[in-house]
Amino acid sequence: MKFIASAFTIALAATIAVGCHNSSPTTGANTNTDTTKTTTNTPDSVLYAFVVLGCNRLSASDTNTQSIPSTANLAQLDRTFTDIAALNPRPNILFMSGDLVLGQGSDTAVLGRELRGWIQHYQASPVAIPAIRLVAVPGNHETQGQSNKLAYAAAEQAWVNNMSAYLAGSNGPGVGGADHLATDQSRLTSSFDYRDSHFVTMNSDPTGGDATVPVNWASADIAAARSAGQKHIFAIAHKPAYSWDGGITDRLTTSNRDSLWSVLEANHVEAMITAHNHVYRRLHPTNDTWMIIAGNGGSSLDSDLPSDQNYGFAVISIMKSGKVLMKEYARNFDGIYNDPCPAATYPTTLRDSADITWQ
């Protein structure tokens, strides 16, 4: 096992290293991660890479502390954008996997203002460049109401209207179909190819089906990608299939999870990457497809463990050799989740790495 010294600052640690060995997580990841694979020291290089993180919204009581009405934790978001821009090589895609804003109300005009505030802040950031494509995936705070915590059609439409420039595509499932959807999900759930990878982005809280994803559509979409010759497949959503603590809440429903996981494994999907749980975890539930939770984007954390008191993001690199390497970068903070985190005091360092190539 190879550990990276905690003093390794972002200027060096952010470099997406080659020939990486599997490492045990240093951020409190569950003990059911796989540490049995071995790699060689043969030189390798990154063909392309992508970043995933989610859950950056503030708590309701803290949203009156900033002038831009995004309701995002701007202190952490700014550090994350700066850190991602410093990666070498820079990622080709940045996935924001839900709960970008507080939302979760009955007034979609408010939701729209929050989303536009988030976009305004993103567009002024160092990652808003043509070389890095932003893809946004809705979370429950964008699609659900406050009183009943259920998704509703007007919130879904507000998401599509405001985030249209940053959605994966429009090839998702419509009303009805094999998944019996109550509303049109064609832009909330969709897929696209990038080089030899296929990305499936899914709304995990559709109207009438909270905490589910459209498994039948995903099955057909992923099978078609495999038939077309795509070598790598990744599923990205807000709610995880398996939760960070092994609990029965804060994830997809059991029946939906089991059906989805069967599809992912049957099609050799390398990983499902999500947020929702406000922590980082790398899990290997059935020793095939990986479950990666990158929910430490800036919201108040779910875990009190000292090893979980950090904010960061996951980087997945597709290597020239065909390997798929995952790295998690994170930084500590002063104990107040929405305080600024100066890099000199709280450097971003490599906390976890693994070879997640399908075996």
Image (spheres, rainbow, N blue to C red):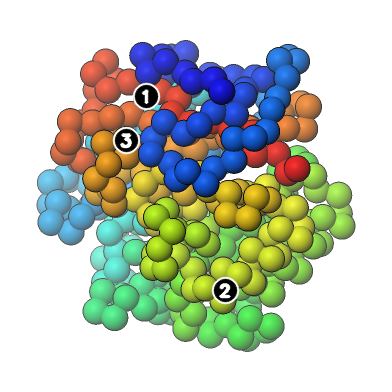
Q: Earlier in the sequence, mark 1 or mark 3?
A: 3
Q: Which mark is residue 80?
A: none
How crowded pointer 3 is (Cα within 10 Å; few <14, some 14-19, many 20+) is rated as some
Q: Is residue 131 left or right of residue 24?
A: right
Q: Earlier in the sequence, mark 2 or mark 3?
A: 2
Residue mark closest to the camera, 2 vs 1? 2
Numbered disc 3: secondary structure: helix
Does the CB distance between marks 2 and 1 fall below 8 Å? no
Q: Earlier in the sequence, mark 2 or mark 1?
A: 2
Does the CB distance between marks 1 and 3 fall below 8 Å? no
Q: Residue at x 17, y 31 (%)?
A: 334
- Which sits in the foreground, 190 or 219? 219
Q: CA distance from mark 1 to mark 3?
A: 14 Å
Q: Residue at x 56, y 68 (%)?
A: 257
Query: Is residue 338 among what the camera can see?
Result: yes
List x then y, in percent, for residue 114: 29, 57
Which residue in the protein does label 2 denote? 256
List x then y, in percent, for residue 1: 56, 23
How crowded pointer 2 is (Cα within 10 Å; few <14, some 14-19, many 20+) is rated as some
Q: CA distance from mark 2 to mark 3?
A: 31 Å
Tell me the amino acid under the disc marked 1.
Thr
Q: CA distance from mark 2 to mark 1?
A: 36 Å
Which residue in the protein does label 1 denote? 348
Numbered disc 1: secondary structure: loop
Which residue in the protein does label 3 denote? 307
Tell me the amino acid under the disc marked 2.
Asn
**On screen, residue 39 above or below 103:** above
Tell me the amino acid under the disc marked 3.
Ser
List x then y, in percent, for residue 160: 48, 65
Residue mark closest to the camera, 2 vs 3? 3
